[in-house]
Image: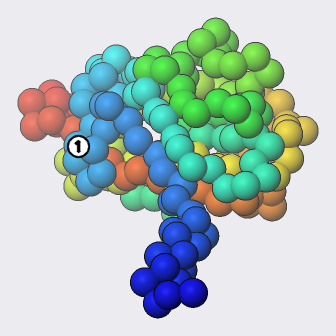
């Protein structure tokens, strides 16, 4: 075999063995950028739309049998952060969620999906609402690829239990981190 032909074959083999990264994207969120009023909570002194952003993911790990999506604030002054959304048992062929899909009752979620309790005490998306006067908090949106078709949990499952089950059954995850601080005019009203 001629050297050039051998080099082309080797290059082709190298490219064929390359795997694409598991990625999470959103038309409403940009990595490191602030959330909008649409993703702000409605309550606790906040007056946002409390609407989950649209999310899409690509290149899940081989063997993925279901997905889960979580939103977590590691900066909440609780000692353990704050869970804003936990939805699991999303089918293996799903590649995203539409904007507003975190509404109570989950009408726009795929059949069989479960939204469990957040730290607001109820299932469904709970938007950003850091304490007045606090620094901007980080909100970590994560899609989890799972090796099981479903987690045997219901809508009353506590966030720590869901987190444990996600980590125990994880094949990989992809995250997008946004930030949020209360607008100055809102803080002045407090």
Residue drawn where x is 69% and y is 41% of the image: 67
Which residue is at a point 40% across and 58% down the rendered structure image? Answer: 75
Residue 74: image location, x then y, percent:
45, 58
* Other residues around mark 1 within 10 Å, as few (<14) / some (14–19) / many (≥20): some
Q: Quadrant of the N terminus?
A: bottom right
Q: Where in the figure is residue 163, as x and y percent of width and height? A: 70, 53
Q: Quadrant of the C terminus?
A: top left
Q: Is residue 130 above or below residue 138?
A: above
Q: Which residue is mark 1?
A: 34
Whether residue 101 can be seen here: yes
- Residue shown at the point (46%, 33%) measured from the top left: 55
Residue found at the far front of this picture = 1
Observer-nearest residue: 126 or 9? 9
* Residue 180 visible to the viewer: no
Q: Nearer the viewer, residue 48 or 12?
A: 12
Q: Quadrant of residue 157?
A: top right
Q: How many marks?
A: 1
Q: Residue furthest right?
A: 152
Residue 40 percent location from the top left of the image: 33, 29
Q: Residue 151 at what x, y percent from top left?
A: 84, 41
87 vs 135, left or right, is right
| Most foreground residue, 33 or 126 | 33
Say which residue appears at 23% left-offset and 47% top-offset. 33
């Amino acid at each position: 075999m001629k050297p050039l032909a051998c080099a082309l074959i080797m290059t082709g083999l190298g490219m064929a063995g390359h795997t694409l990264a598991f990625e999470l994207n959103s038309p409403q969120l940009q990595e490191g950028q602030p959330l909008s009023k649409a993703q702000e909570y409605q309550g606790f002194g906040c007056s946002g739309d409390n609407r989950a952003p649209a999310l899409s993911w690509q290149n899940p790990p081989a063997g993925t049998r279901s997905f889960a999506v979580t939103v977590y604030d590691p900066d909440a002054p609780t000692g353990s952060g704050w869970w804003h959304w936990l939805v699991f048992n999303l089918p293996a062929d799903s590649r995203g969620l539409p904007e507003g899909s975190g509404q109570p009752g989950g009408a726009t979620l795929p059949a069989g999906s479960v939204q469990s309790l957040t730290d607001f005490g109820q299932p469904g998306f709970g938007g950003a609402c850091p304490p007045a006067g606090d620094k901007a908090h980080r909100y970590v949106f994560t899609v989890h690829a799972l090796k099981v078709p479903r987690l045997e949990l219901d809508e009353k499952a506590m966030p720590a239990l869901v987190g444990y089950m996600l980590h125990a059954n994880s094949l990989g995850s992809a995250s997008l981190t946004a930030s949020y601080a209360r607008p100055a005019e809102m803080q002045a009203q407090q």
